[in-house]
Amino acid sequence: MEAFAAYSHALAALVIFTLIILALSPVSALAKQKAGLAPGATPREDYADKAYRLNRAYLNGCETLPAFLTVTLVAILAGAAPFWVNLLASLVLVSRMVMIVIHLRGAGKPHGGLRSVFYVIGWACIGGLALLTLAAVF
C-alpha cells in the first residue's frame, strides 16, 4: 500500500475517529439505560443531564463521520497534497476529541462557547478537504 503511505496521518485520523464513535455508542446506550430510557430513545434536552451529553457526543460524531470520511478518502484518491490532507484530517480528529471532552464534562454553554468553536474548526477543515479535492480533480 505504498501508494497511500503519504496519507498515513489522514488514514489514521479516519480510523481513530471511527473507533471513538464505536466506543461512544455503548457508553451512550448504558447512560440512557441507567436513566431508564428505552433502547433508541433520546434523552430529554437538558445539557446538565449526562445521558443527554453522551448521546449528543455520539450523535455529533455519527453526523460528522460521513462527510469527513468522504472528503478525506476522495482527497487521497484524487492525489491532493498529502501535507494538507494529513494536516486537515488530523485537525478534524483533534477538534472532535476536544468537543467530546467538552460534552462529557458538561463544560461551556449549550449554545455557542468553546464547543461551538471546535465544531467550526472541524467543519472548516472538512470544507478545506473538500476544496483540496476539487482542486486536485480539476
Image: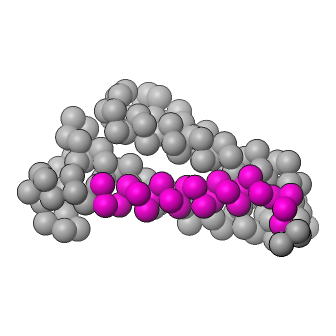
Q: Is residue 38 magenta?
A: no
Residue 19 position, x and y percent, is 50, 59
Quadrant for the C terminus, please. Answer: bottom right
User: Would residue 66 be visible to someone looking at this image?
Assistant: yes
Magenta span contains residue 17: yes
Task: Judge from the rendering whether residue 98 lies leftward or rightward of residue 81; answer left or right.
Answer: left
Q: Residue furthest left?
A: 36
Residue for point 35% across, 28% down: 107
The spot of residue 23 in percent (x, y) is 41, 57
Magenta range: 4-27
- Say whether residue 133 is left or right of residue 119: right
**Residue closer to the observer: 62 or 1:** 1
Q: Residue at x 47, y 29 (%)?
A: 114
Outermost residue to the front: 1
Task: Examine the rendered structure and indicate whether residue 23 appears above or below residue 117.
Answer: below
Q: Position of residue 101 (x, y in %)?
A: 42, 37
Residue at image position (25%, 38%) is 47
